[in-house]
Image (tube, rainbow, N blue to C red):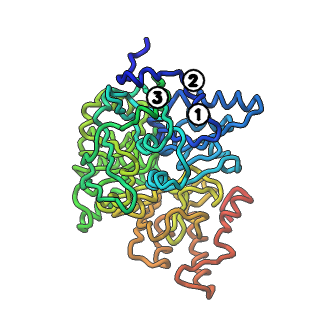
């Protein structure tokens, strides 16, 4: 049985089309802003229909590609479907799709990797050109034309404001109880007209629950009933539990020293199994009345809200496993009082992050001896996903931590290296590095002091002798000794891996 339409505005209801008809309204070469943030709130039907159209056109010898802008990563039904038919010429600002990744690294798709806080203002500045079409999933349309946001907000406010034409996917799978959970702030402006953003606590509501939309720009409304695509998180393993343990112990120490309050400062956590293990540790730990100000709310934070350890959580998207989605939907009235979903220009706003004093925890690919962090590129050249919001948080947080296992690829790769093969977060923005081996607090240390702490506390024992040897020879080389390096060897570990499949000598 088809659910009743959630399009309560008569004018927009008259513009109801099939996904195939809507996809025909997107021209070749268009810059298309689509909703979606880590597998939540992305359009399900129109991208698939557009991919089928592109495949037919390519089979007939006709060229057709679009520039694809989103909030962050999406799902196989969007990124994957369009990439598999060669339909994306330019992707930005963040992706995690295997086909996109392959095409980017093969030079077949251009990719702009940007800080997530920069996207909306850069589009307003016109730095990436005119946005032609917006394809936005919503949970409903009110009689006056306002939109009930879906399970993510991302850049939807900007896409709706900036696009010449709008296609709405109204997804009846999304819980009706989402209404009232969002806080859409319309007070941002361009210089010189910017004013302070009046948010002083993570749970503050400073906007309105709905997205505004000019009905005259809506060219199609597509009814859908399809779930978000989020996978289950793996159970914490020994490595992630050890990383979590080091962080909990460190935070307890910081509270004991008076550098953090007993309930900590607002938490920001990246996505993934290690992050969920840290959140599970916090849920079982000694801290009460915690808050979160982050970009993605995942299973661990839902557990913390349910247990009462976490009083409130602010994010721009939900990234929940199927089991957590069921829990969220069943008790949505409870969660609506404790969760605020915002545009990512607010969730990732540098001034707010700094003023609220966040504790930032993000993953990385590798770190070097001096605290420079690579979070995006494998062997310095191949993009993994993108910087996402980690730079927004790391540079501005009260406490910035980066987490990784000490080894990768079955021990062939050391995640602590002499020199990072690509730098996303410089030593100036990295305060704490954590692996299952231990935690290195780098605050107040010179580069040479940092190198010793990083080696002894974070590097895997199999690679410590080689790292010690590298530092000793670099310091004795007679070159600059503030940040000692042997330039002929600095990236030799990476070169050895590319050549032989292992960093081990």
Residue 21's tag is 2
Whether 394 is drawn above or below 185: the answer is below
The disc at residue 396 is none
Give the quadrant of the N terminus.
Answer: top left
Q: Secondary structure at mark 3?
A: strand
Q: Position of residue 172 (x, y in %)?
A: 40, 23
Q: Nearer the viewer, residue 486 or 429?
A: 429
Query: Which residue is situated farthest in the bottom direction here?
Result: 478
Q: CA distance from mark 3 to mark 1?
A: 14 Å
Question: Going by the picture, which residue comes out furthest to the front?
Answer: 216
Residue 363 appears in the figure: no
Q: Earlier along the polypeptide chain: callout 3 or callout 2?
A: 2
Label 1, on which residue?
A: 26
**CA distance for labels 1 and 2:** 10 Å
Position of 237 with respect to 487 (left or right) is left
Identify whether 385 is placed above or below 29: below
Q: Nearer the viewer, residue 288 or 372?
A: 372
Decide which of 375, 84 is in the foreground and name it: 84
User: According to the image, label 3 marks what residue?
Assistant: 169
């Amino acid at each position: 049985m088809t659910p009743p339409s959630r399009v309560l505005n008569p004018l927009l209801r008259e513009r109801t089309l099939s996904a195939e008809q809507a996809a025909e309204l997107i021209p070749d070469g268009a810059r298309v802003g689509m909703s979606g943030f880590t597998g939540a709130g992305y359009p399900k039907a129109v991208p698939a229909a557009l991919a089928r159209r592109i495949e037919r056109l390519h089979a007939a010898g006709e060229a057709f590609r679009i520039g694809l802008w989103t909030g962050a990563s999406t799902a196989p039904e969007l990124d994957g479907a369009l990439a598999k038919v060669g339909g994306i010429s330019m992707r930005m600002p963040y992706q995690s799709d295997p086909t996109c990744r392959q095409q980017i690294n093969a030079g077949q798709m251009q990719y702009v990797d940007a800080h997530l806080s920069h996207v909306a203002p850069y589009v307003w500045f016109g730095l990436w050109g005119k946005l032609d079409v917006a394809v936005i999933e919503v949970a409903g349309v009110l009689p006056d034309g306002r939109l009930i946001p879906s399970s993510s907000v991302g850049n939807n406010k900007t896409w709706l404001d900036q696009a010449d034409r709008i296609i709405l996917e109204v997804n009846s799978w999304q819980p009706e109880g989402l209404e009232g959970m969002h806080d859409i702030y319309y007070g941002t402006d361009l210089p010189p007209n910017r004013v302070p953003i009046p948010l002083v606590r993570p749970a503050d509501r400073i906007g309105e629950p709905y997205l505004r939309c000019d009905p005259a720009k809506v060219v199609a409304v597509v009814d859908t009933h399809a779930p978000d695509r989020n996978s289950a998180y793996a159970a914490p393993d020994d490595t992630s539990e050890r990383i979590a343990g080091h962080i909990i112990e460190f935070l307890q120490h910081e509270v004991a020293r008076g550098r953090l309050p007993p309930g900590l400062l607002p938490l920001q956590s990246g996505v993934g199994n290690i992050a969920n293990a840290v959140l599970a540790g916090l849920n079982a730990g000694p801290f009460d009345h915690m808050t979160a100000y982050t970009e993605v709310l995942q299973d661990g934070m839902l557990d913390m809200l349910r247990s009462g350890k976490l009083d409130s959580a602010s994010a721009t998207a939900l990234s929940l496993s199927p089991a957590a989605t069921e829990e969220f939907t069943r008790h949505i009235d409870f969660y609506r009082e404790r969760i605020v979903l915002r545009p990512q220009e607010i969730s990732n706003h540098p001034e707010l992050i700094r003023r609220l004093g966040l504790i930032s925890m993000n993953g990385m690919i590798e770190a070097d001896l001096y605290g420079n962090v690579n979070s995006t590129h494998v062997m310095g050249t191949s993009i993994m996903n993108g910087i996402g919001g980690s730079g927004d948080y790391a540079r501005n947080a009260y406490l910035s931590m980066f987490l990784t296992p000490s080894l990768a690829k079955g021990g062939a790769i050391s995640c602590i290296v002499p020199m990072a093969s690509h730098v996303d977060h410089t030593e100036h923005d990295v305060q704490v590095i954590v692996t299952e081996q231990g935690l290195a607090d780098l605050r107040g240390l010179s580069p040479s002091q940092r190198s010793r702490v990083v080696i002894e506390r974070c590097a895997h024992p199999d690679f410590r002798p080689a790292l010690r040897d590298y530092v000793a020879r670099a310091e004795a080389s007679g070159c600059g000794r503030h940040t000692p390096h042997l330039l002929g060897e600095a990236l030799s570990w990476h070169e050895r891996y590319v050549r032989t499949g292992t960093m081990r000598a």
